[in-house]
Image (cartoon, rainbow, N blue to C red):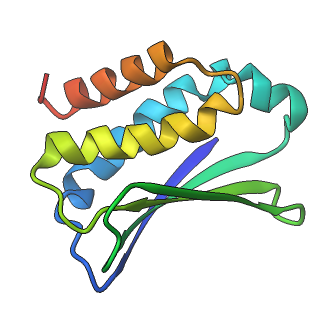
Amino acid sequence: MVSVTYFQWGAKNPYHSETHRAIWETLNAHFPTWKGFLKRKPDYDVWFNIVAKQGVTNLEVKGPDISRRHKEYVYGIYLPEAIADVHEYLDLVFAGIGQVVAEFGVGAEEVAQMKEECKARLGLS
């Protein structure tokens, strides 16, 4: 299973409330295809913490933090402080997710497909 959470430290994230569910649903629909992760850690979940933090100017991806106790891999996706609109927001979020899932053998084409599916769920395509 994939979980998505949001944090704000001195910066606003005006798009998280309208996009949260669509991102979560899209990622969970594709999670069973992440064979590179599931083969190595079949009992583990993946968490994406999407962070709006003051002073961040470029997308940054950190992690994983691994909890053997909770069986979780946790990644932080730190978004730039200035984001023009929801389209740029989703581009950044899925660029960060793409960096992570590439480690599991998920290709750029599948990440692009996930982003388009998410936009469709939001009525943006």
Furthest-bottom residue in view?
10
Q: Residue 2 appears at what percent x and percent y?
A: 59, 44
For residue 88, side relative to residue 6 (left or right): left
Q: Quadrant of residue 8?
A: bottom left
Q: Is residue 90 above or below residue 102?
A: below
Q: Residue furthest front?
A: 57
- Count of labels shown? 0
Furthest residue to the top?
Answer: 109
Left of 48 or right of it: where is 92? left
- Residue in the picture at 57% in, 17% down: 107
Q: Quadrant of residue 63?
A: bottom right
Q: Position of residue 82 (x, y in %)?
A: 18, 64
Q: Is residue 68 above or below residue 39?
A: below
In the image: residue 14, left or right of residue 75: left
Residue 27 falls left or right of residue 13: right
Task: Residue 48 in the image: state x and y as whole percent.
Answer: 54, 54
Query: Residue 62 is drawn in which quadrant?
Result: bottom right
Q: Quadrant of the N terminus?
A: top right
Taking 17 as reference, is 52 above or below it? below
Residue found at x 40% / y 38%: 94
Indicate the quadrant containing the C terminus: top left, top right, bottom left or bottom right.
top left
Q: Residue at x 73, y 53 (%)?
A: 73
Decide: is 90 above or below 106: below
Image point (21%, 24%), residue name: 120
